[in-house]
C-alpha cells in the first residue's frame, strides 16, 4: 500500500511538466517552529482572535506586536531543514517558479539562499502568501522595512506616522491580491500540486490544490497525518517532510 503510494508519487513527480508546491507549518516543525493546530500548536495555547486579527491590533497593538516579536526571536535559532532544502534544490533544478507557502518564518528563502548562493534564481524563492515576520509594514501606507526590536513606544512610520506592524496577514485581512493571483495561476497551470505539512483548512491557500485538480492536475500530499485533502490526493505519503521530500525529489 505505502509502496504503491511512493511509486505513484515518484512517477507523478518525474512526469509532471509543471509542479507547484504548497507548504504549511508542518514543513518547519522539524526546524523547531511550532505548528498551529497540532498538539502543542500555537492555537492550542493562544487565542488567534486576541493576537492575530485586525481588531486585536486596533484594540491592543502592544500585545500583538509583542507576540510577533516573541515569534521572531524564537525563530532566530531555527534553521531550514532537509525538507526546505530539497524543495529549494528541486525548483532551482527546474528553473521554474512553483513554491507557494503559508509560512511566515522565512525558512524557504533561507534554504534557497543556502542552496543557490547569495543570489538565488527566482525559481527557488517562495511566494509567501501570509507575509513574513522578518518584515514590518506601515498600517497606513505601503512602506516596508526589515523588522526591528520593539522599543518602549509603539513604532511609527517615518513617512506618514502610521503604526509600524509585522508584514503578515492577520485573520480577516485580505491576502496581497497580486501574490494570490500569481499563486492561482501557478496552481492552475500545474499538472502536479505537492502539498506539504498543511492542515489545508485556511482559505484561500487551501483552495490552490483544488484549483490544480479542477484544471485537470493531480495532488501529492506529504504529511504525518491525514487531512481533508488526503481523500482527493492521487498519492499521500505519510512521514516527516524532512525525510520524505529528499527521498521524493532528489
Ligand atoms: P497547521 O498547524 O494547521 O497544520 C500543520 C500540518 O502539518 C498538520 O496537518 C500536521 O499533521 C502537519 N505536520 C506536522 N509536522 C509535520 C512534519 N514534520 N512533516 C509533515 N507534516 C507535518 O498549519 P498550517 O496548515 O500551516 O495563518 O496553517 C495554515 C494557517 O493557519 C497558517 O498560515 C496561519 C494559521 O493560522 C495565519 O496566521 C493567517
Image: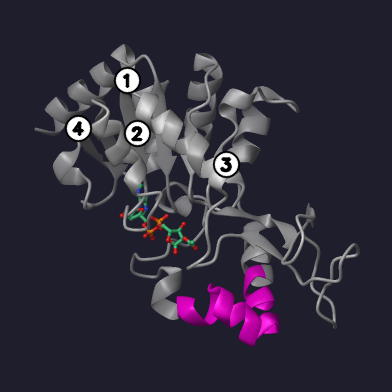
Q: Nearer the viewer, residue 169 or 103?
A: 169
Image coords of residue 126 (percent x, y): 56, 37
Which callout, 1 or 3, points to the residue nearer the camera?
Answer: 3
Crowdedness near tag 3: few (<14), some (14–19) or many (≥20) residues, C-alpha within 10 Å: few
Q: Is residue 88 above or below residue 167?
A: above
Give the mark nearest the N terminus, 3 or 4.
3
Asked if residue 154 lies left or right of residue 49, the reply is right
Q: Circle 1 — which element?
A: helix
Q: Circle 3 — which element?
A: helix
Disc 2 + disc 1, Cβ < 8 Å:
yes
Q: Quarter for ligand 1?
A: bottom left
Q: Nearer the viewer, residue 150 or 84?
A: 150
Quarter of the image for residue 243 reads top left
How many discs mark residues in the rendered view? Answer: 4
Q: Is residue 80 visible?
A: no
Q: Circle 2 — which element?
A: strand
Marks 4/1: CA–CA distance: 11 Å
Secondary structure mostly taken by the magenta-highlighted segment of the chain: helix
Q: Is residue 65 visible?
A: yes
Which callout, 3 or 4, points to the residue nearer the camera?
Answer: 3
The residue where tag 2 is placed is: 194
The residue where tag 4 is placed is: 235
Asked if residue 137 lies left or right of residue 102, the reply is right
Give the mark nearest the N terminus, 3 or 2.
3
Asked if residue 142 lies left or right of residue 195, the reply is right
Quarter of the picture holding the C terminus: top left
Crowdedness near tag 2: few (<14), some (14–19) or many (≥20) residues, C-alpha within 10 Å: many
At 65% across and 71% down in the image, what residue appears?
70
The residue where tag 3 is placed is: 178
Q: Which residues are magenta?
A: 47-68
Amino acid at each position: 500500500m505505502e509502496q504503491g503510494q511512493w511509486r505513484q508519487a515518484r512517477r507523478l513527480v518525474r512526469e509532471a511538466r509543471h509542479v507547484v508546491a504548497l507548504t504549511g507549518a508542518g514543513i518547519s516543525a522539524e526546524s523547531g517552529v511550532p505548528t498551529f493546530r497540532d498538539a502543542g500548536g500555537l492555537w492550542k495555547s493562544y487565542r488567534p482572535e486576541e493576537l492575530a486579527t485586525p481588531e486585536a491590533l486596533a484594540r491592543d497593538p502592544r500585545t500583538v506586536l509583542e507576540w510577533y516579536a516573541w515569534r521572531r526571536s524564537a525563530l532566530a535559532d531555527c534553521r531550514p531543514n532537509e525538507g526546505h532544502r530539497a524543495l529549494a534544490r528541486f525548483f532551482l533544478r527546474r528553473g521554474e517558479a512553483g513554491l507557494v507557502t503559508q509560512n511566515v518564518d522565512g525558512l524557504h528563502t533561507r534554504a534557497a539562499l543556502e542552496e543557490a548562493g547569495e543570489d538565488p534564481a527566482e525559481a527557488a524563492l517562495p511566494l509567501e502568501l501570509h507575509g513574513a515576520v522578518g518584515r514590518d509594514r506601515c498600517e497606513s501606507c505601503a512602506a516596508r522595512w526589515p523588522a526591528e526590536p520593539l522599543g518602549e513606544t509603539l513604532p511609527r512610520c517615518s513617512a506618514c506616522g502610521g503604526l509600524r506592524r509585522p508584514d503578515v496577514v492577520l485573520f480577516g485581512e485580505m491576502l496581497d491580491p497580486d501574490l494570490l493571483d500569481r499563486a492561482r495561476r501557478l496552481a492552475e497551470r500545474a499538472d502536479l500540486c505537492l502539498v506539504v505539512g498543511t492542515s489545508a483548512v485556511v482559505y484561500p491557500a487551501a483552495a490552490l490544490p483544488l484549483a490544480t485538480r479542477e484544471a485537470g492536475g493531480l495532488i501529492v500530499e506529504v504529511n504525518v497525518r491525514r487531512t481533508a485533502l488526503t481523500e482527493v490526493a492521487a498519492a499521500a505519503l505519510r512521514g516527516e517532510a524532512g525525510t520524505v521530500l529528499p527521498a521524493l525529489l532528489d
